[in-house]
């Protein structure tokens, strides 16, 4: 960056001040950045590409989902506590 402000006259151009460093430059050398600021070529920078990143929405569901299956119990699967024939652990007396 040159510390010397330009001087002289260029037909059709004008003086402008940088919005960031306040340096005086010719208007035809100034640029508009992504924040719509009128800046000199030394202060100009492109927007960082990662400013545009969008977070990926997380899918919290498991990849395979199964319906809850109905359980059919046979009569022998049902353990009925009978204190006269078995103790509380199901062992015969
Ligand atoms: Zn500047």
Image (cartoon, rainbow, N blue to C red):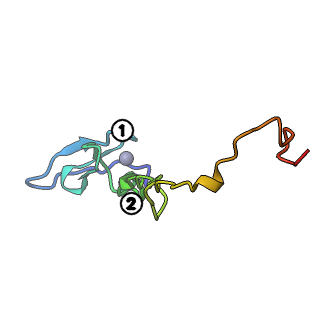
In this view, which residue lies farthest toward the front? 84
Point out residue 83 in the picture as x, y percentages from the top left corner. 81, 35
Residue located at (83% from left, 42% from top): 85
Left or right, 7 with respect to 92, comes to left
Residue found at the far right of this picture: 93
| Residue 84: image location, x then y, percent | 83, 36
Q: Quadrant of residue 44?
A: bottom left
Q: Looking at the image, which is closer to me, 65 or 62?
A: 65
Quadrant into which the C terminus falls:
top right
Mark 2 nearby-residue class (10 Å; few <14, some 14–19, many ≥20): few
> Which quadrant: the N terminus?
bottom left
Bin the neighbour count of mark 1 within 10 Å (Cα to Cα): few under 14, some 14-19, many 20 and up: few
Which residue is denoted by mark 1 in the rendering?
A: 22
x, y percentage for residue 57? 40, 52
Give the left or right position of residue 55, taking residue 88 as reference: left
Residue under pointer 2: 49
Foreground: 75 or 44? 75
């Amino acid at each position: 960056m040159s510390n010397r402000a330009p001087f002289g006259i260029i037909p059709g151009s004008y003086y402008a001040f940088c919005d960031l460093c306040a340096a005086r430059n010719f208007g035809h050398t100034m640029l508009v950045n992504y924040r719509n600021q009128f800046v000199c070529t030394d202060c100009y920078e492109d927007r960082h590409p990662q400013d545009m990143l969008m977070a990926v929405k997380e899918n919290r569901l498991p990849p395979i989902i199964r319906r809850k299956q109905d359980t059919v119990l046979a009569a022998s699967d049902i353990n009925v506590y009978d204190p006269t024939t078995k103790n509380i652990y199901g062992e015969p007396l």
